[in-house]
Image (cartoon, rainbow, N blue to C red):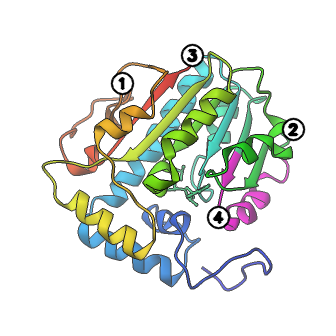
């Protein structure tokens, strides 16, 4: 990345961030040497991580399209949205419905810097810098309140973010606060790293991420299922990402690349 980062954005280039390490996985340009170092250490343990990131983005596209097209969802609350990359949530949702509202929230200030540039002329989309560990502050944020009508169904997206919260930060409780804040007919879309009993590298990756990035909890299928408590899971349930309503034939659903992340969509009854 060029050295023209806007000053005053609160960026510390000596500390890796999840958004920028993920950007490396997606072959983006918004990352620094320290992020590439963590990405390369992770790829040494699990070379499939780049393909896993692609599976994650592809599921995001399918879910947003499905909810906008088939379920009439017009509001998307994308928490831990990451740096802008190819086909963001607002592009997919507003392709179906140009009036769809999208609020991106991320803790990394670089997301806001790049988001402003991309969204300068999009009145139906906002980017907020905030910490999901304080969900009530996010819900009350003026930019969130300005765009999202909490009296109408909303899709809360927690895509690839909950594994960046430690157990003591109570990710389940955060999901619960958000669940209580939205009306019935709202959806939760969650994907997460999954501990694979037959693949020791899933535990090894957790060790590398926790020591070098400070976050990256690889959770069991049971821990992930608990995030959907009180919600009705849409078929096919909580599954390896490529298996969630695929557009075509899934050729490989048994590899680590297919199974290391699982995801699902739940509806608040
Ligand atoms: N949701 C995008 C996707 O799945 O393609 C990006 C996922 S990226 C792996 C995880 C994102 O969560 C990063 O952009 C990171 O900055 C953000 N994040 C991590 N902890 C956060 C927190 N406490 N509050 C808000 N965002 C957070």
Distance from Cα at disc 4 to Cα at disc 3: 32 Å
Q: Which residues fall within the magenta stretch? A: 104-121
The reply, left or right, for residue 91 in relation to residue 145 is: left
Q: Check if residue 85 falls in the magenta segment.
A: no
Distance from Cα at disc 2 to Cα at disc 1: 33 Å
Numbered label attached to residue 70: 3
Q: Position of residue 57 (x, y in %)?
A: 47, 46
The reply, left or right, for residue 250 in relation to residue 93 is: left
Earlier residue among tags 4 and 2: 4
Numbered label attached to residue 78: none
Query: Is label 1 in a helix, a strand or a loop?
Result: loop
Q: Which residue is mark 2?
A: 146
Task: Confirm if mark 4 falls within 8 A of ligand 1.
Answer: yes
Q: Which residue is mark 4?
A: 108
For the view shown, which residue lies furthest in the front direction?
A: 168
Q: Counting other residues with Cα less than 10 Å from the Cα at mark 4, is it few (<14), some (14-19), or many (20 or more)?
A: many
For the stretch drawn in magenta, what is the main secondary structure?
helix
Q: Check if residue 108 falls in the magenta segment.
A: yes
Q: Which residue is mark 1?
A: 237
Q: Residue at x 67, y 45 (%)?
A: 135
The mark closer to the camera, 3 or 2, is: 2
Find out whether the residues at labels 4 and 3 contact each other: C-beta distance under 8 Å: no
Task: Confirm if mark 1 falls within 8 A of ligand 1.
Answer: no
Q: Quadrant holding ligand 1?
A: bottom right
Earlier residue among tags 2 and 1: 2
Q: Residue at x 38, y 68 (%)?
A: 209
């Amino acid at each position: 990345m060029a050295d023209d980062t806007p000053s005053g954005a609160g960026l510390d280039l000596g500390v890796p961030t999840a958004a920028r390490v993920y950007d490396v996985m997606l072959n983006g340009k918004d990352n620094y040497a320290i992020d590439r170092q963590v990405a390369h250490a992770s790829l040494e343990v699990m070379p499939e991580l780049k393909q896993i990131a692609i599976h994650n983005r592809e599921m995001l596209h399918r879910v947003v399209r499905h909810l906008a097209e088939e379920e009439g969802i017009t509001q998307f609350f994308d928490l831990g949205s990451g740096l802008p990359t190819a086909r963001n949530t607002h592009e997919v949702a507003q392709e179906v419905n140009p009036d769809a509202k999208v609020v991106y929230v991320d803790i990394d200030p670089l997301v806001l810097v790049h988001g402003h540039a991309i969204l300068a002329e999009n009145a139906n989309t906002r980017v907020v810098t905030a910490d999901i560990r304080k969900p009530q502050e996010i819900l009350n944020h003026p930019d969130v309140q300005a765009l999202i009508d909490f009296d109408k169904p909303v899709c809360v997206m927690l895509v690839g973010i909950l594994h960046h919260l430690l157990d003591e930060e109570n990710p389940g409780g955060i999901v619960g606060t958000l669940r209580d804040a939205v009306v019935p007919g709202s959806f939760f879309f969650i994907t997460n790293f999954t501990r694979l009993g037959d693949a020791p590298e899933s535990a090894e990756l957790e060790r590398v991420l926790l020591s070098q990035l400070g976050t990256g909890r690889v959770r069991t299928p049971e821990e992930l299922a608990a995030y959907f408590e009180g919600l009705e899971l849409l078929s096919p349930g909580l599954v390896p990402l490529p298996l969630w309503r695929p557009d075509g034939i899934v050729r490989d659903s048994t590899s680590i690349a297919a199974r290391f992340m699982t995801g699902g969509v739940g509806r608040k009854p």
